[in-house]
Image (tube, rainbow, N blue to C red):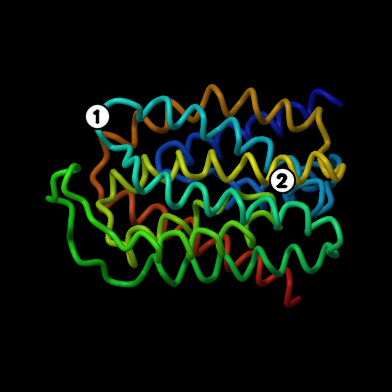
Amino acid sequence: MSIELFIVLFLIGFVGSYISGMLGIGGSIIKYPMLLYIPPLFGLAAFSAHEVAGISAVQVFFATIGGVWAYRKGGYLNKTLITYMGVSVLIGSLIGGFGSDAMSEATINTVYGVLALIAAGMMFVPKKGREDIPFDQITFNKWLAAILAFIVGVSAGIVGAAGAFLLVPIMLVILKIPTRVTIASSLAITFIASIGTTIGKVTTGQVDYVPALVMVVASLIAAPLGAKLGKNLNTKILQILLALIILATAIKIWLDILM
């Protein structure tokens, strides 16, 4: 690996993981297009969709560890929510991770584009405020949460994501979980999901380990820093930032698919 590629990969991993820690996502929604498009802009190695998905899967695994560790205090982690959605998304991501090996590059990119478009639409749906509910009094439909998490897991496993960019809108809009609990709990759920996705990608030979290692190092440094900032930002600002990032990514992916 050249020093130029090392620097570019490290910066992609750092920026993406900082944002993921701040917004409660694994970061694939950001890093997938960055890995796909940025290295070739500098005349560096162009990664295939399979390679990008594999690198993203491993990186998300470690980025979410850092984010969860930063949120471990403060009561933001809802154990019931994490259990129901975590188990379901893990099963789904295992299925998607293994199944993706038989898919074409265009299919993987299309699945990613569809997921990003759905997530972007959900983030702009008006949300009824539940921010003032005490953390120990939060209620939600457990089986609906489990079913939606399974569907997200299968889809996200295909693209090497852990699905947090879909889980966060689902938790905010459908399950009506307060923003800070959503961000913290989604990181824990994403970590569980990334286990299945990573196993699927590794066992089917879809991971380029050297670039993945560079991204992992950047993630372990940046994710806790982003989570620290996220705990202090206004919840409306967090929601707007996430919505804009998802929308921009969806537009870019679809432009490339359709052109």
Q: Secondary structure at mark 2?
A: helix
Q: Residues within 10 Å of mark 1 (few under 14, many from 20)?
A: few
- Looking at this view, name the residue that lies furthest to the front: 143
Residue shown at 50% from the left, 58% from the top: 149
The circle drawn on residue 102 is none
Residue 182 location (% of width, % of height): 34, 48
Q: Residues within 10 Å of mark 2 (few under 14, many from 20)?
A: many
Q: Toward which corner of the image does residue 194 lie, by quadrant?
A: top right
Q: Nearer the viewer, residue 182 or 116?
A: 182
Q: CA distance from mark 2 to mark 1?
A: 34 Å
Q: Is residue 82 left or right of residue 127?
A: right
Q: Amino acid at mark 2?
A: Leu
Residue 98 location (% of width, % of height): 78, 53
The circle drawn on residue 35 is 2
Residue shown at 71% from the left, 69% from the top: 110
- Locate the N terminus by quadrant: top right
**Disc 2 or 1, which lies upstream in sequence?**
2
The circle drawn on residue 74 is 1
Residue 244 location (% of width, % of height): 44, 59
Q: Amino acid at mark 1?
A: Gly
> Is 158 drawn above or below residue 34 in the view shown?
below
- Locate the C terminus by quadrant: bottom right
Q: Nearer the viewer, residue 1 or 20?
A: 20
Q: Secondary structure at mark 1?
A: loop
Q: Nearer the viewer, residue 149 or 73?
A: 149
Total labels drawn: 2
